[in-house]
């Protein structure tokens, strides 16, 4: 099935006769395979008499050989489909795999976001990536980790021309207040000793604009740059950036990266609402401390908040001011 998708990934028409000859099966059998392709992978196939079949939009598929050759920082596994790359990392750890190692997939059937949300993961469109690492100083090295990862992703996106990308505390990257990337950190281990940590990264790359039920404003790299993005080159750059920033984080701590993170904080000095359970706390985001905790000015007093089960929204006054600017 992946071979059929690869043939059609150019977005051009291929006749049933051509496809039948390639796979040495009948045109009727090809038709059945195309129906299965649509049902199993959610891809849309156009069929026009006299022209043949094509995917309604081209795909940039992951190339195992290229990724294995050019990603040298750690082993990477490339899968056609998986429930969740984060979940698969923990599964491989249980089977004896030794960190660091990475997993990426063309599709997730149960992609995970923060706070138990689903992460939309259509086939062949985006980056679904997880990296398993071991932190030797337990909870000490967890401080600011998700912010370090956000900075690594930001540098990657800026390198390919996404100049308006910014960081939203604690785990998101936005372009013009539309989400382009989310980060999910999951862990197991001893807070005083070793932590096995999965760093999950989802980037909207060539995300289709229709037929997706997403409950917040979002954008994709393709929408921002106006062209199909090569996901292989993007993944290679991402791994280089992750290795560099993780090395700084583990050797010198997040404090070394704090100022750079704040320089790219899109809500710096803006009025925000912090949602903590059923409680809403309104204040001005004045930055972060050396551990990555949010600093919020509330009633002329600075309060500190760790990521945990909280989320951040622009206050209506900030939204209105942005619309006027």
Image (cartoon, rainbow, N blue to C red):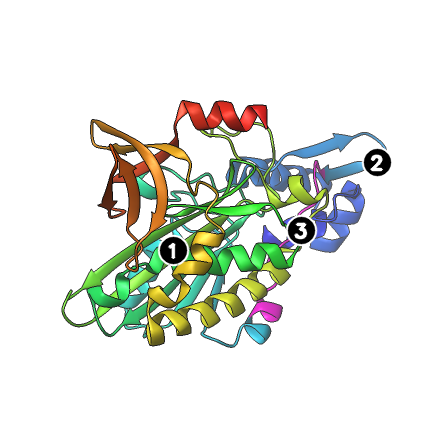
Q: Position of residue 65 (x, y in %)?
A: 60, 70
Labels 3 and 1 touching (C-beta < 8 A) = no
Return the residue at label 1: 147
Q: Is residue 287 visible?
A: yes
Q: Nearer the viewer, mark 2 or mark 3?
A: 3
Q: Is residue 291 left or right of residue 319?
A: left
Could you tell me which secondary element the residue under label 2 belongs to? loop
Mark before the other along the chain sequence, 2 or 3: 2
Q: Quadrant of the rendered structure where residue 175 is?
A: top right
Q: Which residues are magenta?
A: 55-67
C-alpha distance separating marks 3 and 1: 25 Å
Residue 51: which disc? Answer: 2
Quadrant location of residue 95? bottom left
Q: Is residue 201 left or right of residue 137?
A: right
The answer for how far apart the CA atoms under marks 2 and 3 are is: 27 Å
Label drawn at residue 62: none
Residue under pointer 3: 229
Answer with left or right where residue 32 lies relative to residue 94. right
Q: Residue at x 51, y 35 (%)?
A: 177
Q: Quadrant of the C terminus?
A: top right
Coordinates of residue 30 in the picture (x, y in percent): 67, 42
């Amino acid at each position: 099935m992946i071979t059929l998708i690869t043939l059609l990934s150019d977005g051009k028409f291929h006749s049933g006769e051509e496809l039948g000859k390639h796979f040495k099966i009948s045109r009727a059998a090809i038709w059945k395979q195309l129906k299965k392709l649509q049902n199993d992978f959610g891809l849309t196939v156009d069929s026009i008499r006299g022209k043949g079949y094509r995917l309604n939009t081209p795909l940039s598929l992951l190339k195992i050989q290229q990724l294995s050759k050019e990603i040298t920082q750690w082993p990477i596994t490339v899968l056609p489909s998986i429930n969740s790359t984060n979940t698969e990392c923990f599964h491989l750890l249980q089977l004896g795999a030794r960190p660091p190692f990475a997993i990426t997939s063309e599709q997730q059937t149960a992609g995970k976001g923060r706070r138990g949300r689903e992460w939309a993961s259509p086939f062949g469109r985006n980056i679904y990536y997880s990296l398993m690492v071991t932190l030797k100083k337990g909870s000490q090295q967890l401080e600011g980790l998700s912010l370090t990862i956000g900075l690594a992703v930001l540098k990657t996106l800026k390198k390919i021309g996404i100049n308006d990308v910014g960081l939203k505390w604690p785990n998101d990257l936005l372009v013009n207040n539309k989400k382009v990337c989310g980060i999910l950190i999951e862990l197991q281990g001893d807070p005083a000793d070793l932590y096995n940590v999965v760093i999950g990264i989802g980037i909207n790359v060539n995300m289709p604009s229709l037929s997706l039920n997403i409950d917040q404003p979002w954008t994709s790299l393709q929408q921002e740059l106006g062209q199909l993005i090569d996901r292989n080159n993007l993944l290679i750059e991402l791994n280089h950036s992750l290795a560099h920033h993780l090395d700084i984080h583990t050797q010198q701590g997040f404090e070394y990266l704090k100022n750079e993170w704040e320089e790219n904080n899109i809500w710096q000095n803006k009025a925000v609402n912090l949602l903590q359970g059923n409680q809403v706390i309104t204040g001005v985001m004045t930055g972060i401390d050396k551990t990555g905790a949010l600093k919020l000015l509330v009633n002329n007093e600075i309060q500190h908040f760790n990521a945990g089960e909280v989320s951040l929204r622009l206050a209506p006054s900030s939204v209105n001011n942005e619309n006027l600017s």
